[in-house]
Image (cartoon, rainbow, N blue to C red):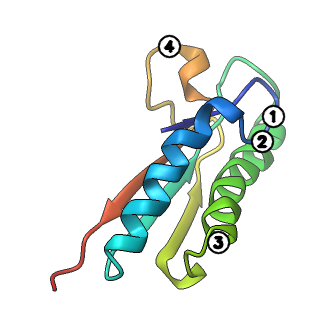
Amino acid sequence: NIYFLINSSQLRSSEHGKLTLLVSYLKSHPRSHVEMTGYADRLTGTSVINDRLSRERATAVANYLKAHGISSDRIYKDAKGDRVQPFPVNEDNRVTICFVVDMLE
């Protein structure tokens, strides 16, 4: 889970360690890919703003991976805006959730 500040899609320096681990894993497992979904919290902004924000959050994570050598054909993005709230704590829904899918060797 890559967390963001309110009304922001800028990657926080506190999240870079997680991203570095993700890049390292993907590089050492070339048949794996990552599926990510961006979210926004329901209590802040409008649904139009939150749809845009959740897309930008997923894109920020995808761009980081691509900038660190992960091919775009291994990255699948989605965004849910504020229609889905994966966590009970509002602030935790300012997130892009990433799942690595390992393909059989």
- Mark in the foreground, 2 or 4: 2
Tell me which amino acid carries mark 2: Ser
- Mark in the foreground, 1 or 3: 3
- Mark in the foreground, 3 or 4: 3
Sequence-wise first label, 3 or 2: 2
Asked if the residue under mark 4 is in contact with the one under mark 3, i.e. CB atoms within 8 Å, the reply is no
Q: Which residue is mark 3?
A: 66
Q: Secondary structure at mark 2?
A: loop
Distance between mark 4 and mark 1 Cα atoms: 18 Å
As rendered, which of 65 and 50 lies closer to the eye?
65
Sequence-wise first label, 1 or 3: 1
Distance between mark 1 and mark 3 Cα atoms: 20 Å
Q: Which mark is residue 89?
A: 4
Q: Tell me which corner region of the image, top left, top right, bottom left or bottom right, holds residue 10.
A: top right
Q: Which residue is mark 1?
A: 8
Residue 98 screen position, x and y as percent: 45, 51
Which residue extends farthest top? 89
